[in-house]
Each structure stands twice: as C-alpha cells, then as structure tokens.
Image (spheres, rainbow, N blue to C red):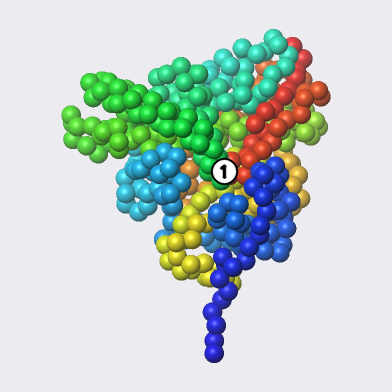
C-alpha cells in the first residue's frame, strides 16, 4: 500500500500570539531549521518560512491565490488585493497610472521632497522627536494621500490609516472596539469618496482616484463608490504604512550602527537607497502575505489541501541564512540582492516604487537637516508586530 506525502496542516507549532508579536525572529529561525512548513494556530494560517518555499509559492499564482476573507472584513469587496486574473489586471491598471516608476519620477521632486522638508523642519529646532509618529507617518500619509487625491487634513488621513491598520492587525484577537472604530472610518471614507466622485464627474484632476473613477469607461460615465472604496482602503493602509514604517525600520537598524549612520550622514543622497533596501529586508513592514490554496498542492515534501489559509512569512524569508549572510544584522554595505518586502507575483505591491522613493527622500532630508541624528539614549524604541511589524515608536535626538 502506498501513501502520499504528509499533510502540512498536521504539523503544528503552537506559540502564543503575544510572543510572536513581541519578537518573531527566534521562532522564524527555529522553524526554518526544524519545521519550515507548519500550522500556527494563533495566526490561523499555515506558515511557509524559508526563502525557497516562499519563492516557489509566490511563483504559483494559480494555486496560491488571493484570500478574500481578510480583505472583505477589513476593506470590503471588491478590492484589488482580493482579485485575480483579468479582473485583477483591470482593477490595477488605473493605479499604475500614478504609481509606475515613470509617473513617480515626474512628481517626486515637486511633491514628495517638499512634503518631507516641511514636516522635518517643523521639529528641526527641538533637538528630539518620536520620529515614527511625529515625522515619518505624517510625511508618508500626506505625500501618498496627495498622490491618491485624498483632499482632507493630515489628522483625517492619519486617523483613517491608524484605524484601518489597527483592524487589520487585530484580526487574531477580535477586539470589538477596534472593529467598531474601523466601521466608523469605513463609513466616513465612503461618504467622502461619494463626494469626490461627484466632483470628478464635473472636473477631472489626474489623481489616482480620478483614474479609478474613469478608467476604461465612456466619457460621462463614472464608477460608483461601491466599486472603489475597498481598493482605496487597501491603498491607505499599504500606501501609508510601507514608506513610513519602512523608513522607521531602516533608521532603527542604521542608527543602531553609528559608524554606518556616519557614512549616510556624509553622503545621504548616495546611500539612501541602500539604507532603505536593507531596512526593508531586515524588518519588512508587512511581515507576511496571506494566500488561499485553490487546489491541493505538494510543496516542500508536504501536501497542502485546497482551501488552506497560507502565511508566506516574508519576515522569515528575508532572513534566510541560505540567501543572506549574517541575516539578523543590519548591514548598509551588504551586497544588494532582491528580497520579498513587496510581495510576490501578480500581487507584487503596486506602490513599491513610490514607497521606496518616499522613504529614500525622507532619509536624505533627515540626515541633511538634522545634524548628529542618533537614537535617544533615554528612551527605548518600541518594535512590535507580526502581520505588520515596525518601530512603532523611534525616539531620536540631534544637534539642534
């Protein structure tokens, strides 16, 4: 009698969610060595933790497809993250209009850099700041919000971002207060977008929302708020978080190595790209991407049944010893190779280029305008999260 490969879901690694969120990296390293594919009950997903496993699954969009459950709950359907095939390509096309590299290069110096300068200058004379909340998230939300065409105050952008991001991050716990707050935000966003659609029906402005409303339709026709609100929600969370928290994580690593920070201070423009790239590898803002298997599949010698919720653990793959030398060390001078910070395949992040540009410009202007930038010796950074992980607070000082 012959038997097939073992079922992947029968291998269980039972670790409390609080422990995973506090610091998942020891668990990642152990799983890569001992149980690279395992069901982790606290996250309700089957984890793939090595570079090779994530690469294999990421290249098989037809099997490891989008999951709708999370995205329907947090953002509502339809949204671009929950789509596949031709439907996904059609929904992504109007986003590409403002996020492809050529388009970004056309506005990065006139929109992004002045935004970074404005918010850095607001704290410049103080000599200290909590960098993530007081500077980085404000730069990212305003710059990307302007690209999207969200004509609302900074405080509204940040409230929308924090509320929806908290709901995404809370799914393993189900705090009803967080869910209720997110519902209020989604209703507010829906009302706002209904008004913007009316404005854009009469006067187009070239924003991302303008393209989403009009793309592929005859003159005079527009999409309804129901057709775009879910995707706008995903763009608020992903679009604001990746540049802000990507920069925060890069700066956490860089400032932890004063000799490398000194090199960036001496050449901010020349080394900003390397700083951001290594930060995205070291602590990617989105530590995993969720998938759903469309059919039974064998990977890594184990059978994964159809309908299994998958976590392709980017945070682990980006520190796989088989690909990166001394992977737990932030190293500005590491040989540059690709990492998985922006995902896989057809769902590779549409905003990856603008996220890098916002983060790089922010690093350049911080080191140009804040001499002696360094970690605050009196206050510890707070680094937390599994699904999304970042230096949630990053206290710094400089020579004002």
In this orientation, does residue 313 appear? Answer: no
Relative to 18, say whether 126 is above or below: above
Count up the numbered dots: 1
Q: Position of residue 180 (x, y in %)?
A: 46, 32
Q: Which residue is drawn at 76% across and 50% down?
A: 326
Q: Considering the numbered disc 1 on the image, is that residue within a helix, a strand or a loop?
A: loop
Nearest the camera: 176 or 122?
Answer: 176
In depth, the one of 345 and 266 nearer the eye is 345
Q: Is residue 17 visible?
A: yes
- Identify residue for label 1: 173
Q: Is residue 217 left or right of residue 103?
A: left
Measured as percent of width and height from the top left, residue 10 is found at 59, 68
82 with respect to 45 (left or right): left
Q: In which quarter of the image is residue 33?
A: bottom right
Residue 203 image position (x, y, % from top left): 26, 20
Crowding near the residue tagged with mark 1, few <14, some 14–19, many ≥20 C-alpha atoms within 10 Å: few
Instruction: Look at the picture and state if 63 lies above or below 352.
Output: below
Q: Quadrant of the C terminus?
A: top right
Question: Residue furthest toward the bottom?
Answer: 1
Q: Which residue appears at 76% of the width and 29% of the height?
A: 380
The residue sitting at 26% across, 33% down in the picture is 224
Please say if 338 is above or below 61: above
Q: Which quadrant: the N terminus?
A: bottom right
Q: Which quarter of the figure has residue 295?
A: bottom left
Q: Residue at x 35, y 34 (%)?
A: 229
Extreme residue toward the top, this view: 125
Q: Is residue 327 left or right of residue 117?
A: right
| Closest to the observer, 370 or 62 | 62
Q: Looking at the image, which is closer to me, 105 or 261?
A: 261
């Amino acid at each position: 009698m012959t038997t097939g490969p073992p079922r992947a879901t029968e291998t269980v690694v039972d670790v409390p969610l609080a422990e995973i969120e506090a610091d998942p990296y020891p668990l990642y390293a152990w799983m890569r060595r001992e149980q690279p594919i395992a069901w982790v009950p606290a996250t309700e997903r089957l984890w793939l933790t090595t570079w090779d496993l994530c690469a294999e699954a990421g290249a098989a969009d037809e099997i490891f497809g989008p999951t709708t459950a999370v995205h329907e709950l947090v953002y509502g359907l339809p949204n671009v993250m929950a789509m596949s095939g031709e439907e996904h390509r059609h929904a992504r096309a109007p986003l590409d209009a403002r996020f492809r590299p050529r388009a970004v290069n056309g506005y990065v110096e006139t929109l992004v850099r002045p935004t970074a300068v404005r918010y850095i200058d607001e704290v410049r004379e103080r000599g200290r700041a909590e960098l993530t909340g007081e500077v980085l998230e404000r730069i990212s939300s305003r710059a990307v919000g302007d690209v999207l065409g969200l004509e609302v105050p900074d405080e509204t952008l940040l409230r929308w971002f924090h509320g929806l991001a908290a709901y995404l991050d809370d799914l393993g716990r189900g705090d009803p207060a967080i869910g209720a707050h997110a519902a209020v935000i989604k209703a507010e966003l829906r009302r706002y977008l209904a008004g913007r659609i009316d404005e854009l029906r009469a006067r187009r402005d070239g924003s991302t929302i303008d393209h989403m409303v009009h793309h592929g339709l005859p003159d005079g026709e527009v999409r309804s708020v129901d057709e775009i609100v879910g995707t706008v929600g995903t763009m608020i969370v992903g679009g604001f978080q990746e540049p802000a928290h990507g920069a925060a994580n890069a700066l956490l690593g860089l400032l932890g190595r004063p000799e490398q920070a000194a090199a960036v201070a001496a050449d901010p423009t020349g080394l900003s790209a390397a700083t951001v790239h290594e930060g995205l590898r070291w602590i990617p803002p989105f530590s995993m991407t969720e998938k759903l298997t469309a059919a039974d599949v064998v990977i890594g010698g184990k059978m994964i049944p159809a309908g299994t919720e998958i976590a392709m653990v980017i945070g682990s793959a980006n520190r796989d010893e088989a690909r990166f030398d001394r992977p737990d060390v932030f190293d500005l001078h590491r040989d540059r190779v690709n990492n998985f910070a922006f995902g896989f395949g057809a769902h590779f992040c549409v905003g990856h280029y603008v996220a890098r540009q916002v983060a790089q410009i922010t690093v350049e202007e911080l080191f140009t305008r804040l001499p002696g930038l360094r970690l605050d010796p009196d206050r510890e950074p707070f680094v937390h999260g599994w699904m999304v992980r970042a230096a949630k607070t990053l206290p710094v000082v400089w020579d004002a």
